[in-house]
Amino acid sequence: MFETSGAIASLGNQGYEGAQIAVQHINASGGIKGRPIELVQINSESDETKSVTAAKRLVEREKVVAIIGPHASGSCLAILDTIQRADMPMICNGASVKVAGPAAERKWVFSTTITDATLVGAEIAYLKKKGISRVGVLNSDNGFGVSGREQWERLLKENGMALVVQETFGNNDQDVTPQLSKIRAANTQANVIWANGAALAIALKNYRQLGIDKPVLLPNGATDPNLLRLAGEAVNGVLFAASKLSIWDQLPDSDPQKALFKRFVTDFHAKYKRDPSGFAGNGYDSVEIFKTVISRAGTEPAKLRDAMEQLKGMPGVTATFSYSPTDHYGIQPSTLTMQTVKNGKFAPAD
């Protein structure tokens, strides 16, 4: 149930495309024990209410084996009750740490997405190495933005760093200069813009237009090719933590994920005539993970769910995944690299 329309369709479409590449790979090699996978897509429309309707349809009418998506954290949180009541195994791609955790309260929900807590932790480690301790945060008012702000507040404090100023803007706002003007006036050493989709592009363009000369950190939504298009030159120089997919061709041949990256990117480009982002990788990994656990445990919901918790060391496009009864995320900070954009191209950060 990827959001192929609405506010973050740019992410959902890529997740759906990545999932289709995985289905293509699996069915071309004989499916699961000789049976092909059928992908039933219902658009969640970047809307929490419509996401609930979509989830109920998949469970009650389509009788699916498992559910993947959406990318909006708010949509993931909105459907939790439906998923839990239905005993439906699900991989949700929202980045909020609340989506699949704590595991005891999210019995049926897993994730292939790098959480905001993991992203923020990696970015704070980078700032500390650079001697930066005074930070400003601007976040959108949707589930993703609010959860991200909470992680910045918590982890800055835990690391003895100062949150100098914090501002919030509406996810549908077309101008964010009032909030950014307050951030510009504050005594920060670096600033954060935590939003996704078009909202991130608008805020980043406003940041540059105001001439704020402090480093700006973004979530891994910076790897969305649409951000490069929407924000233009404003995206050059941003800093963000992300999976290695966006810089895969700059990795040494010894990297254990490079061959998987190459196959995925090659086939994705052949089908869609462009390169994938990390969000396409989330969709791809979700299908591959369900294929692996269904091959081992079958499609009975409880057995499938238990097999998810026993999955260890599975290499994916996003990361290497290991789940457990206490960890339904499975991605460690070591998976990430700090990156930037130079002349419209992704590159390792200095």
Image (spheres, helix red, strand yellow):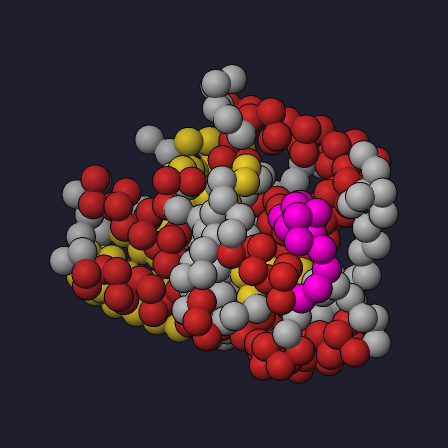
Indicate the position of residue 206 as horizontal and vertical percent values: 45, 58
Using residue 70 as the reference point, say whether residue 28 is left or right of it: right
Residue 69 visible, this angle = no
When the figure is inspected, residue 324 is found, relative to residue 129, above or below; the finding is below
Q: Nearer the viewer, residue 204 or 220?
A: 220
| Total marks placed | 0
Q: Nearer the viewer, residue 276 or 206?
A: 276
Q: Residue farthest to the top?
A: 253
Indicate the position of residue 261 as horizontal and vertical percent values: 60, 31
Quarter of the figure with residue 63 = bottom right
When the figure is inspected, residue 214 is found, relative to residue 271, above or below; the finding is below
Q: Nearer the viewer, residue 47 or 63?
A: 63
Residue 101 highlighted magenta (yes or no): no
Indicate the position of residue 97 as horizontal and vertical percent values: 43, 64
Identity of the residue drawn at 27% across and 66% down? 153
Indicate the position of residue 256 as horizontal and vertical percent values: 50, 26
Q: What quarter of the picture does the N terminus occupy?
A: bottom right
Quarter of the figure with residue 276 = top right
Which SS type dominates the magenta stretch?
Answer: helix
When the figure is inspected, residue 167 is found, relative to residue 114, above or below; the finding is below
Identity of the residue drawn at 33% across and 31% down? 350
Residue 23 visible, this angle = yes
Identity of the residue drawn at 26% across and 60% down? 155
Using residue 275 as the reference point, say whether residue 133 is left or right of it: left
Identity of the residue drawn at 71% across and 74% down? 55
Q: Which residues are magenta?
A: 287-301
Quarter of the figure with residue 11 = bottom right
Residue 295 highlighted magenta (yes or no): yes
Q: Residue farthest to the left?
A: 160
